[in-house]
Image (cartoon, rainbow, N blue to C red):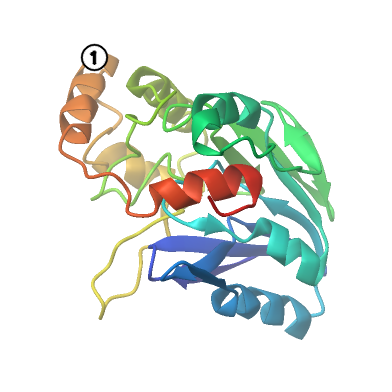
Amino acid sequence: MKVQPFFHRQTGTLTYIVSQSQQAIVIDPVLDYVDGKISHDSLKKVVDELKSQDLELQYILETHIHADHLSGAQALQQYAGGKTAISTKIADVYDTWVETVNGKPLASFDILLNDGDTLPFSDISVNVLATPGHTPADLTYHIDDSIFVGDTLFAPHRGTARADFPGGSANDLYRSISRLYGLPDNTKVYLCHDYPSDDEEPDVYSTLAEQKSENVMLSGKVSEEEYVAARLERDNKLAIPKLLDVAIPFNLTYALP
């Protein structure tokens, strides 16, 4: 299995092409959004790579409804095909934010996923793990020896996702991460975000062993009570994502607010 990251520096987002035997998955694609206008320059780099390797796009997987960037899932599907997929709990997220979408209906996805679902992919499978906490609809995708965790975990020196959005829960997040920590220590943890300086490259992945021993918010020795207290204290100091008022409505409806 081959994993290729694409870093969207403007939003600190990592998109992945995962390929196996000429079949491909794209995870968390991103649109460019500047001064109220959408463009596809970054997304086209993903499309061009799919074409250059003659890969057949099977799935476009969202780890959750993002608050800090606009999803490129619909646009990517128009360019390259594939089936879009997200947690079935997106309906709960929509209900939470319904007043912000001005009556626009929930976007249509080809596949709504539940915990324990599997998607056939070449000669391997995509195993779906529900990992709520950051939002109720967060999913982790377990493919071969790797997990794609969305915002659930960051690089060990950065910690974990925030849990203060509507529907978020630090307790749920602790239990979700603890579940992931039960996987083999050599499992690769592919991240959705990193925030390097302009002259640095992002941290793309770690291992579960590194997360369990080094994560500054939740090592394997931290109790749920300790984590929840630390997470809530940290969340109280965080700013609201700059694009939240645009990203949440767009990612729920595929229409700008």
Q: Is residue 85 left or right of residue 34?
A: right
Residue in the image at 34% along x and 47% along y: 210
Q: Is residue 227 left or right of residue 186?
A: left
Residue 189, image x, y percentages: 47, 49
The residue carrying mark 1 is: 225
Q: Nearer the viewer, residue 163 or 71?
A: 71
Residue in the image at 82% along x and 58% along y: 82
Q: Nearer the viewer, residue 34 or 66?
A: 34
- Kind of residue sitting beneath label 1: Glu
Q: Nearer the viewer, residue 28 or 218?
A: 28
Q: Secondary structure at mark 1?
A: helix
**Residue 149 in sight in this render:** no
The relative height of residue 178 versus residue 194 in the rendered view (above or below) is above
Residue 1, image x, y percentages: 69, 62
Residue sitting farthest toward the bottom: 52
Mark 1, other Cα within 10 Å: few <14 / some 14–19 / many ≥20 = few
Residue 194, image x, y percentages: 35, 59
Q: Is residue 33 left or right of residue 218?
A: right
Residue 10, image x, y percentages: 38, 69
Residue in the image at 84% along x and 56% along y: 122
Residue sitting farthest toward the front: 102
**Residue 64 in sight in this render:** yes
Residue in the image at 29% along x and 17% along y: 224
Q: Quadrant of residue 55?
A: bottom right
Q: How many marks?
A: 1
